[in-house]
Image: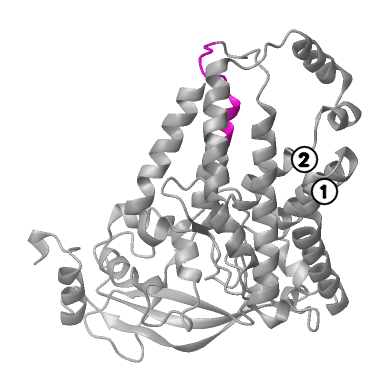
Amino acid sequence: MRSCFFVLWALYLSLLPIGQEWLAYGWDTQILETGFLAMMLAPLLDGRPFPRRAPPVVIIWLFRWLAFRIMLGAGLIKLRGDEVWSMKELSALVYHYETQPVPGPLSRFFHFLPRWFHQAGCLFNHFVEVVVPWFAFWGRWPRHIAGVLMVGFMGVLILTGNLSFLNWLTIIPCLACMDDSLWRRVLPRFITARAEKAAQSAESASKGHWVMVLLFTGYVGWWSVEPVRNLISPNQMMNTSFDPLHLVGSYGAFGSIDKERYELVFQGAYVEVIDLLTDWKDYEFKAKPTDVMRRPVWITPYHYRLDWAAWFPWHRYQGGARNAWVPHFLWKLLQNDPATLGLLAQNPFSDHPPKYVRVLVYRYRYAPADDPSGAWWTRERVETLVPAVSLEHAQLRQIMRENGWMREESR
């Protein structure tokens, strides 16, 4: 069992150096830390499908330490990062449900709730992320209540948005706050009876297992100094690893909130000459808004990384690395590349590749639920980010050559 965990962890770790921005999210390091902790729970050498060795309790405490860093880091970065989270305004959720990366089917409902509800939501967010994590290290009942609140909070986030597998992953260390005395009260008797029977015959962890656990605990303790400094620093950084194995990191999300939703809309046209009457067709993504009539989808815990990359606000990252993938994407669209088109919901040019593609910027807003057209969104064009380009476009070809993205036959 431990070897299986280790192989999975090592494979994921090997992807990060080559993943560039596509594997640069906080949960890509959080899953490494969580996975390694899970590996340390498993017996060192035990091939039985259901090992009968009790897990070292120190690993359970390290799970709680992880939950503490995740929640407190997320809370502090909000209080430090954007005035809309401040106790003076408490307006972050007025915008968040509409401007979050990939809204879900329930997001519009929450968006149109009264302002006092959003302010109460901000207060609850601060309470769960800043106050509650401290109780993860207290006595049994305070710790149980903290675990229930943190897990419940993650459930709310799952219902109101599509934050990849972040919330599902965060539930795992939060569960470590709840022990068997709580589960006996909430789980069916036939389950708890089997668990009690297994506990009676459980063997203690082997000496080899304990040696590895103690070495790992020392490693975590040594590298925890920097995350603690980061938490108390006014210049706190989100989603940063301080050790080379990504086993002790700092976390946080939505330190700033966008007040308006801007979307990159990719379009293609099959014409020889562009004019005012050119019929441009939208490329539809699997999750992010494009068609205003399309109901938001529920994708959690999956992570459609292209949709997320296309969400990053164009006005904030103009000229920056966050939009550096766009020319390559356009190049692939102009060739009807099957692998690239497989990342989209539909291809408007299934019979032949487009002659031209372009990228527009639209401002999206939720349409009221009683909108007679049945639309989920309204949108208005803001500007053209990338004007019409073809495979022969000189600047596009230059970018492709400079980045080593152009195959020899295309040169």
Which one is earlier in the sequence, the residue at label 1 or at label 2?
1
Looking at this view, name the residue that lies furthest to the top. Answer: 201
Quadrant of the snapshot with the C terminus: bottom left
Residue drawn at 84 percent across, 79 percent down = 115
Crowding around mark 1 (Cα neighbors within 10 Å: few <14, some 14 to 19, many 20+) is many
SS at mark 1 in the image:
helix
Tag 1 near tag 2, CB within 8 Å: yes
Residue drawn at 74 percent across, 7 percent down = 201
Q: Which residues are magenta?
A: 37-47
Residue drawn at 87 percent across, 32 percent down = 182
Residue drawn at 49 percent across, 89 percent down = 382
Which of the numbered marks, if any, corresponds to residue 175? none
Residue carrying label 2: 177
Does the magenta portion include 278?
no
Looking at this view, name the residue that lies furthest to the bottom. Answer: 276
Place residue 194 in its image quadrant: top right
Which of the numbered marks, if any, corresponds to residue 146? 1
Between the residue at mark 1 and the residue at mark 2, the CA separation in whole angstroms equals 7 Å
Residue 252 seen from this side:
no
Place residue 190 in its image quadrant: top right
- Measured from the top left, where is residue 99 in percent x and y? 62, 74
Place residue 408 in its image quadrant: bottom left
- Measured from the top left, where is residue 97 in percent x and y? 69, 70
- Tell me the kind of residue under disc 2: Cys
Nearer to me, 200 or 170: 200
